[in-house]
Image (spheres, rainbow, N blue to C red):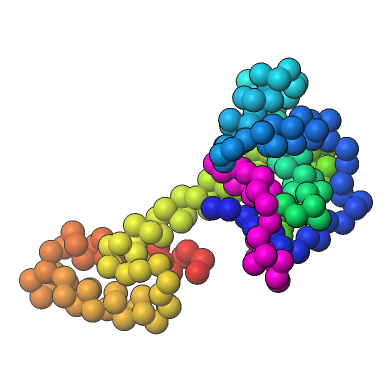
Amino acid sequence: MWALYSVYVFPEQVISLNPIKAAVLAILKIQNEAISEYQLMQLLEADGVELPDARASELGLFRRHFMVMNALYQIQRDVFDDGYHLLIGALEIRLKPRSVEACGQALLNEGELKLQAYYLDWDNLSQTSEQELADMLAQFWTRYYSLDKKQAALDTLGLAGDVSAAEIRDCYRRLAAQHHPDRGGDPLAFIDIRQAYEVLNQCPG
């Protein structure tokens, strides 16, 4: 999904000179279609731009990604006043003329603002250690699997994603009564329903 920005808040103290910024901008200017971050990295290396070695370690991969994202967010700030949007997504990156509609209020939510600020803070590149990166990845996968389990639990109860705790409880009680073994129901289905209810109780909203 595109991250569209119509109002920019870029504290100058978090901006540092990125050595690949000019090369990234040169590539974006000649692209007629959106490209992915991976494609951008390939084009940079084809132009002789040296990026951190992603094969050496997870930290090398992180630094490679961070440098590209930092350059993109800096360019996004620079081109806005010239009448352009730099649309940034993991799979879609594109420089395009800014529409009149994009001159209104900011379209960033709180999460997007935090992401923006993170990649514009050069200290997050220079000061992230192997252990800190391992911790970040562990937190990511914990959240990922939690969301995966939550969706499976919702599917088991036949619920959509945006439901209240009361709706979950009412649905559980109805299905539990329907499938309870004492009422001739399927014991395995009853267990699945109970497990789904417990997962949804433990997952954040």
Residue 49 position by quadrant: top right
> What's the residue at 71%, 66% (across, down)?
103
Magenta segment range? 86-111
Q: Is residue 81 visible?
A: yes
Question: Foreground: 163 or 9?
Answer: 9
Question: Foreground: 54 or 75?
Answer: 75
Relative horizontal placement of residue 128, taking residue 107 as reference (left or right):
right
Question: Does residue 181 show up magenta in the picture?
Answer: no
> What's the residue at 56%, 39% (across, down)?
33
Taking the view exactly as shown, the residue that stands out farthest to the left is 184
Establish if 140 lies above or below 45: below
Relative horizontal placement of residue 13, taking residue 168 as reference (left or right):
right
In percent of width and height, residue 34 lies at: 57, 41
Question: Foreground: 100 or 56?
Answer: 100
Establish if 50 lies above or below 126: above
| Total numbered labels placed on residues in the image | 0
> What's the residue at 19%, 77% (across, down)?
177
Establish if 125 lies above or below 23: below
Taking the view exactly as shown, the residue that stands out farthest to the right is 13
Question: Foreground: 7 or 201?
Answer: 7
In percent of width and height, residue 111 lies at: 65, 61
Q: Is residue 118 visible?
A: no
In percent of width and height, residue 88 lies at: 64, 47
Residue 55 position by quadrant: top right
Establish if 46 lies above or below 164: above
